[in-house]
Image: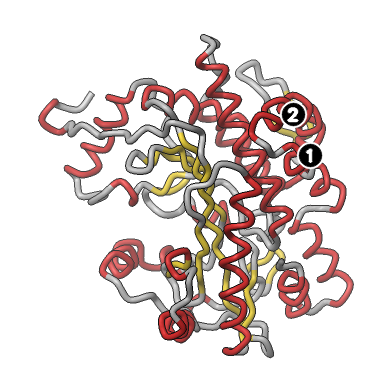
Amino acid sequence: MAPAARIAPIEFHASAAPTLGVEWELALVDRRTRDLVNAADPLFELIEARGLTRRAHIHKELLRNTVELVTGICRTTGEAMDDLGATLAQVRELTDELGIDLYGAGTHPFAEWSSQQLTEGHRYAELIERTQWWGRQMLIWGVHVHVGISHRDKVLPILSGLLTYYPHLLALSASSPMWAGQETGYASNRSMMFQQLPTAGLPFQFHEWSEFEAFVGDQRTTGIIDNLTEIRWDIRPSPHLGTIEVRVCDGVSNRRELAALVALTHCLVVDLDQRLTAGEELPSMAPWLVQENKWRAARYGLDAIVILDSDCNERLVTDDLADLLVRLAPVAEQLGCAEELASVADIVAAGASYQRQHVVHQRTGDLRDVVEAVVAELD
């Protein structure tokens, strides 16, 4: 435990209900070449000039090839998808004017990192100054889902419980099989890339909130972070919002699949919350098992055989997903997302994005066609 002088209390602004918030990162690609384009500045100039009613829901990101669409505080998956849909419609009108398209995947198949421009801002410049080559490599996009938690003492047990379902979320969303013109052999190269940053990757598993506060105290004392948002774990507490933020998923190309992933995340968190409230000890696994599961899902996607529990039982991830959807169905009814949760099975049946990208590449041999196919899925 860190000395008391280094431990600053972290207030958790609890949520009265298990509300939702979704952040959807999309790349900007040239309509002719299908390469990434550093067009965020002209896009945001148009956003301001036109006074878009949804402009507060449209954010800049680290690089000028990216735009992020964010929801307000929502109660259901359907409400979150409608929120994102309204923002997407306004953004697409402007990207049409600029001759660019929105691209929803974890990586771009052939873009070069050296051609990408950094968004202005001290926070971004400092990140690149510290991380150098690895930071400049971050041509990656993902989806972040916030779920409201009613008390801070629930956060860490739920976080550890969620890690047992990490490979399920990553395998379903995997959409980054190609990098710099090459097939990587991974379903999710994004997840492997992002963990190279010093505060990214899998979270530490703490038992008490005071342990998390001590960790943050050490991070601040040693200059690793200045504020909590610089802890970029795949699943992290967001105390200022009163949520757990699930950042496991690769970028997503369309709202149908996004709805399925959001519903699954919402149901998993609420199920764990309810079980905890009922006095149940939540499932957890040793860090080395969680790490192996992440790698297996990143490498093999929906063909991954994942570790289920601390007894090292194993199962094909799609078989476990089928049973998980049945078990979570009553929770989905409570949360008003039964249809969206059931559509998780459609991703398995149709193939995840990484699989669909492979099919296009094998058929045409042209990575521009892969980009074209991903762009065409956006709705």
Q: Residue at x 64, y 66 (%)?
A: 104
Q: Quadrant of residue 45?
A: bottom left
Q: Amino acid at mark 1?
A: Ala
Q: Position of residue 144 (x, y in %)?
A: 52, 50
Query: Quadrant location of the N terminus?
Result: top left
Regarding mark 1 in the picture, which secondary structure is present there? helix
- Mark 2: which secondary structure? helix
Q: Is residue 68 above or below residue 93?
A: above
| Residue 181: % across, % down | 67, 74
Q: Is residue 6 left or right of residue 64?
A: left
Q: Which quadrant is the C terminus positioned in?
A: bottom right
In the picture provided, is 26 more to the left or to the right than 229? right
Above or below, comparing residue 190 to residue 284 in the picture: below
Which residue is identified by label 1? Answer: 342
Task: Give the amino acid at mark 2.
Answer: Ala
Q: Which residue appears at 74% of the width and 24% of the height?
A: 327
Name the disc covering residue 6, or none.
none
Q: Residue 211, image x and y in percent?
A: 30, 26
Instruction: Tell me if label 2 and label 1 are in contact, CB under 8 Å.
Output: yes
136 is higher (above) or lower (below) than 9: below
First of labels 2, 1 by sequence position:
2
CA distance for labels 2 and 1: 8 Å
Depth check, front residue: 254 or 168: 254
Q: Which residue is mark 2?
A: 329
Q: Nearer the viewer, residue 28 or 310?
A: 28
> Callout 1: few (<14), some (14-19), or many (20+) C-alpha neighbours within 10 Å?
some
The scheme the figure's colours follow is secondary structure
Classify 18 as above or below 50.
above
- Where in the figure is residue 262, as x and y percent of width and height? 63, 45
Q: How many residues crowd mark 2 within 10 Å: few (<14), some (14–19), many (20+)?
A: some
Residue lying at the far left of the rendered structure: 5
